[in-house]
Amino acid sequence: MTNHQPPRRTGPVRMQLLSVTGVGLAVLAVGSLVLWHGQVGELLGLTADKEPVVSSQNAPAVSGPPSTTLATTPPTPKPTRSPKQTPKPTKTPTKTPAKSSYGEESINGLSPTLKSRLKKAMAAAKADGITLQITSGRRSAAKQQRLLNDAIKRYGSYKAATRWVLPPKYSAHVQGKAVDIGPAAAMQWLNRNGYRYGICRRYDNEPWHFEALVTPGTKCPPREPYSRPVSD
């Protein structure tokens, strides 16, 4: 073995140092150039503003943020309503039951024939000092039925009752063709003179009951003993 060492390679190392040194110089040169450029730009006014220029018109004051208070508009007044007027209750007119144009004691409810004949008889009787009063002229069917019911209670049977009161469908009173006359003097006068006006007493048991049975001036037919239904 010998103590002789091989020679060192200084060439590549030197080249690396030179490269590093060159790069550092290049970076330094570029930085200097940029710094110089900025300074020159500031001097010449070529550098851009750091903040954009904004028009100050209508801009908020610099001293503080823009006000966040909203503009208050006056509330729209509500339409005033006139107080509601409570409608007055309309009164329904109470209907009064229609009254018939005649009463049971009136001549108006009688048939035209009996009415005209009886008016002439009344005038003649008045001339003789007698007043012919109608105690019962035209009747309603309801009234006739009530009279029949009362007669059945009084006489004890339907057959006996119909000698005095006929059922509504057979009654000459319901048809306006019969009239009961009073007082006794008037019954007697009309019994004697009624034929002159065509008015006759019909039943023996009812001296007050008269009907227009014949032509005026004609003798009255024989009287029936009592009334009876047509079916009997």
Image (tube, helix red, strand yellow):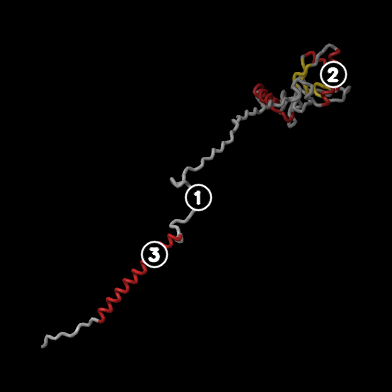
The mark lying in front, picked from 1 and 2, is: 1
Residue situated furthest top in the rendering: 129
Picture quarter with the C terminus? top right
Of residues 223 and 24, the one nearer the viewer is 24
Give the x, y percent position of residue 204: 77, 20
Query: Mark on residue 190?
Result: none
Amino acid type for the residue under numbered disc 1:
Ser
Residue 182 seen in this snapshot = yes
Q: Earlier in the sequence, mark 3 or mark 2?
A: 3
Q: Are marks 3 and 2 in contact (CB under 8 Å)?
A: no
Residue occupied by mark 2: 121
Query: Mark on residue 56?
Result: 1
Query: Which residue is drawn at the image coordinates 87% and 20% (left, top)?
Result: 196
Query: Which residue is drawn at the image coordinates 74% and 22% (left, top)?
Result: 104
Residue occupied by mark 3: 36
Q: Is residue 138 left or right of residue 49?
A: right
Q: In the displayed structure, would residue 232 be above or below residue 190?
A: below
Give the x, y percent position of residue 178: 78, 24
